[in-house]
Image (spheres, grey):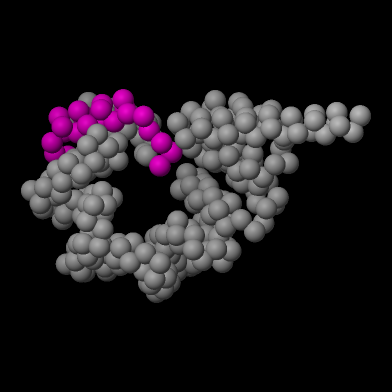
Amino acid sequence: MRALIAFLTTATLSFAQDRLKTAEDLYQKTEYKASLQLLHGLPSSDAAVQYLAGRNYFMLGEYKKATESFQRAFALKPSSSEYAHWLGRTYGRRAETSNWFAAPGYASKARQYFEQAVALDAANEEALNDLFDYYLEAPGIMGGGYDKAQAIAQRIAERNPAEGHFAQAQLADRRKQYDTAEDQLRRALELTPRHVGRMLDLAKYLAKRGRYQESDAFFDKAEKLAPDSPKVMFARANTYVQEKRNLDQARTLLMRYLKCRLSPEDPPRQTAEKMLKQVAGGW
C-alpha cells in the first residue's frame, strides 16, 4: 500500500509539473487565456502556480485578479524579490488606470513593493529600473524625487554601466539638459554597440528632438542588426505615429508587427491594433 501511495504521489506531482510547464510555454507565446485554463486544475497553494496566474492576469489587463494572485504567491514565498516586484508593477498599473481617489494609494503600494523587491535582492535589475522610474515620475508627496532617482541610477550603474548611462539620460532630459541626455545615450551605445535596445533608445530620442534624419539612420542600423525584429518594428512605427510623419510606413510596420510571433516582453497586440486604427483614421 505504501508503495502504491508513493507511486500515486509521484505521478500526481509529475503531472502537475508538466501541466505548469505547458502553461508557462503558453504564457511565453502570449496565449494567456489558454495558460490560465491549464492553471485552474493545479493546486492553489503552489506559489509558482499563483505567480504564473498573476502574470497572465496582468497581461490580460485584469489587474485586480493579478494583485490577488501575486499576493497569494508572495505570502507563500515572502523571500521572493521577483514576486514583490510584480506586485509593485501591478499596483503601478492599477494607479495608472484607476480614478483620482484610488490612484495615490495604489501608487504608494507600488513604491513600497519596488523598494521591498530591491531590499530582498539588490541584484534584481528590473526592480531597480522600476524603482528608478517611480522616483523619476512621482511627485515628492508620493515618495518620488530626482535625488532619490539619482541614487538609484548610481546603483544601476554599478551593476550595469550601460543601463546606468540610460538612467542618467532620463534624469538629464527631465532637467532639460538635452545635450547631456544625448551624450549619455551615446555612451550607453558605445558600451554595447550591438545592443538593439540601446540603438532604439537613441533613435527615439533624436526623433523627439526633431532630428529625424539622424533618428532614421539609427533605426536603419537597428533593422540591419536585427532583421524582422518585432521590437524594432514597433519602436519605429510608434515613433512615426507620435511624430505624425511617415504614416504609410508606420502602417506597414504595424501590420508586419501584428503578424509576428510575440513574447510577453513585446508591446501588446492591442496597443499595435489601436495605433493602426489611429493611422487609418488619420486622427
- The correct choice, above or below, for 107 with respect to 257 in the image is below
Image position, residue 280 (x, y; %): 22, 26
* Residue at the extreme right: 1
In the shown orientation, is residue 96 left or right of residue 232? right
Look at the image and give the residue range highlighted in magenta: 243-265
Residue pictured at 55% horizontal, 60% vertical: 117
Residue 182, by quadrant, is bottom left
Residue 11, by quadrant, is top right
User: Which is more toward the observer, 262 or 106?
Assistant: 262
In the shown orientation, is residue 50 left or right of residue 178? right
Quadrant in which the C terminus appears: top left
Residue pictured at 19% horizontal, 66% vertical: 183
Image position, residue 89 (x, y; %): 50, 51
Magenta includes 253? yes
Magenta includes 254? yes
* Residue at the extreme left: 213
Residue pictured at 67% horizontal, 45% vertical: 47
* Residue at the extreme front: 3
Image position, residue 156 (x, y; %): 40, 66
Q: Is residue 45 visible?
A: yes
- The correct choice, above or below, for 206 with respect to 6 in the image is below
